[in-house]
């Protein structure tokens, strides 16, 4: 890739493939990403006089607001995702290719992918976001992220496996570390995850592991500022703090993480915490592909766009959703990285593509803000919408309703609703399988070879146990 975002011509060819044979002479809109933004652009252009090709590294559309429930064994991964091909099959002009997008040659109007170069007449970049480690990328090696289904499953397996390991751990400190779950970041994702961990441990794992003193288990929510849920009004922030504390979540406010290594969190004030599970929910930035485009980027590496959602001077290239940086939410503040912004940008981008094709002027993006909500464990949520600020059970019902409404597919809605009813009535969780064991064994052996001290202690302690009676 050259510095101006151009892709060198070393791409495999897609000529003579079934994909190329489907090409027509109609204008082709290539959409990068099948998330909230990408999928909605495609659907809005469905059955129109153009061809749409969606590119995504995964073959599914994920509903990330419920990802934390997959990570905490409340929902199975399939319940919050839909295969892209199943969503698009009712449209005669939308196709899909599962491939990694590597860059764009804006002058040649081609997208470089791991499958080959794909030409476009219009391009919509909607590749979403990635974790922001604020320049300390070592954090990514020793913390868990929560960005897609793989992340959520890896985290769920790790949490459940930590309890299994705790069962045969002789060393008290080590065992407590195995049962300590630190969530870094007091935004909605961190708060929802911390509440769900506490419920998983208190309602489910306490019964599953009668031999373990699960009262030793800790859920710690770490936040660098003095606030959690900073985007919510102050009274709702206070409600959330009280609710979390009542549930048993330990809050560490005004505490910034300096480093995380092998189950040890080092804070900038010199203190530390032994925790085998550290989840990073402290910051987001644009998907890494944004860095490969050679275009101007704003805060969080998001791509700067015109109010009509296209790149300045490139009316055929749109950037939407989490990847896009557009001020206007409040003076000097960019639209937030949330699903409603991505969906509404998708609708405007699709309308602007149609307008441009017909020689009509494109319209500037206008956001209709429906408010925000976050759930804090069972039966409780905070809601700030159209001037209504409330918390508690009614807010929680509102949260359930909105999430079911936006979930893609009737089957998923039904499965999620049944799971929620089951979890609510039985105080249980249906998904407690530990999978991915072969990968974990391989990683475990690698850790030993590279001298992970904590894992060595665990093994020697286990070995010295001799036999299990
Ligand atoms: C855990 C979590 C909880 C959230 N909770 C909420 C919430 O409660 N409410 C809310 O409004 N918002 C929430 N969000 C934010 C919301 O999900 C995003 O704002 C929204 O998904 C943005 O849509 P998008 O289309 O820009 O990106 P996404 O929906 O993330 O889609 C991006 C797509 O691009 C694909 N992709 C990325 N890079 C490449 C590449 N190089 N090649 C090929 N494909 C690529 C990805 O696989 C993905 O399918 C949450 C996000 C997360 C991660």
Image (cartoon, rainbow, N blue to C red):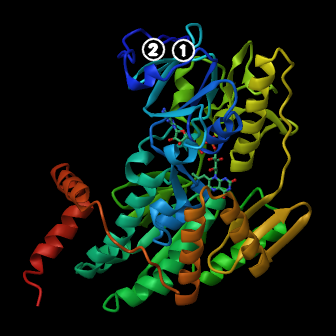
* Up-down relation of residue 62 to residue 98 (above or below): below
Residue 46, picture quadrant: top right
Question: Which x, y percent locates residue 468?
Answer: 11, 86
Position of the C terminus, as image quadrant, is bottom left
| 208 sits left or right of 456 in the view | right
Residue 157, picture quadrant: bottom left
Residue 24, picture quadrant: top right
Question: Which x, y percent locates residue 94?
Answer: 58, 33
Determine the secondary structure under disc 1: loop
Question: Which x, y percent locates residue 373?
Answer: 74, 63
> Could you tell me if residue 143 is visible in this image?
no
Residue drawn at x 25%, y 78% as measured from the top left: 171
* Up-down relation of residue 372 to residue 147 (above or below): below
Q: Which residue is mark 1?
A: 5
| 74 sits left or right of 235 in the view | left
Position of the N terminus, as image quadrant, is top left
Are the residues tagged 1 and 2 within 8 Å (C-beta)? yes
| 395 sits left or right of 71 in the view | right
Q: Which mark is residue 463?
A: none
Which residue reaches farthest right? 387
Q: Which residue is mark 2?
A: 1
Q: Nearer the viewer, residue 177 or 395?
A: 395
């Amino acid at each position: 890739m050259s510095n101006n975002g151009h892709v060198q011509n070393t791409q495999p060819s897609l000529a003579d493939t079934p994909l190329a044979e489907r090409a027509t002479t109609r204008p082709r809109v290539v959409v990068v990403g099948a998330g909230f933004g990408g999928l909605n652009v495609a659907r809005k252009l469905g059955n129109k006089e153009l061809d749409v090709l969606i590119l995504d590294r995964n073959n599914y559309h994920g509903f990330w607001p419920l990802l934390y429930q997959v990570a905490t064994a409340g929902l199975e991964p399939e319940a919050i995702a839909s295969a892209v091909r199943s969503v698009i099959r009712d449209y005669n002009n939308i196709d899909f290719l599962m491939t990694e997008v590597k860059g764009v040659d804006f002058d040649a109007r081609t997208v470089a992918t791991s499958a080959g170069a794909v030409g476009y007449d219009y391009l919509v970049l909607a590749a979403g976001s990635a974790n922001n480690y604020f320049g300390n990328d070592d954090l990514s090696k020793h913390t868990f992220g929560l960005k897609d289904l793989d992340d959520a499953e890896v985290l769920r397996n790790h949490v459940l496996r930590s309890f299994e390991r705790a069962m045969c751990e002789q060393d008290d400190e080590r065992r407590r570390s195995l049962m300590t779950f630190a969530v870094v970041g007091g935004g909605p994702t961190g708060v929802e995850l911390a509440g769900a961990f506490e419920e998983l441990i208190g309602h489910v794992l306490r019964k599953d592991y009668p031999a373990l003193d699960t009262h030793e288990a800790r859920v710690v929510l770490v936040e660098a500022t003095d606030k959690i849920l900073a985007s919510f009004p102050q009274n709702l922030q206070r409600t959330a703090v009280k609710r979390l504390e009542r549930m048993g979540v330990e809050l560490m406010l005004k505490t910034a993480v300096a480093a995380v290594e092998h189950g040890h969190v080092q804070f900038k004030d010199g203190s530390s915490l032994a925790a085998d599970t550290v989840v990073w929910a402290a910051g987001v930035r644009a998907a890494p592909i944004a860095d490969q485009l050679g275009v101007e980027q704003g805060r969080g590496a998001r791509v700067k766009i015109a109010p009509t959602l296209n790149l300045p001077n490139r009316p055929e290239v749109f950037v939407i959703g989490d990847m896009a940086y557009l001020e206007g939410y409040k003076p000097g503040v960019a639209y937030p990285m949330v699903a409603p912004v991505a969906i509404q940008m998708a609708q405007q981008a699709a309308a602007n593509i149609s307008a441009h094709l017909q020689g009509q002027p494109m319209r500037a993006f206008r956001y209709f803000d429906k408010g925000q909500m976050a759930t804090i464990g069972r039966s409780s949520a905070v809601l700030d919408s159209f001037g209504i600020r409330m918390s508690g059970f009614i807010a929680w019902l509102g949260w359930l309703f909105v999430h079911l409404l936006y979930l893609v597919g009737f089957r998923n809605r039904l499965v999620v609703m049944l799971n929620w009813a089951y979890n609510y009535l039985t105080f249980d969780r249906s998904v407690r399988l530990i999978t991915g064991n072969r990968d974990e064994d391989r990683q475990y052996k690698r850790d030993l070879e590279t001298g992970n001290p904590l894992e060595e202690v665990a093994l020697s302690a286990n070995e010295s146990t001799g036999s299990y009676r």
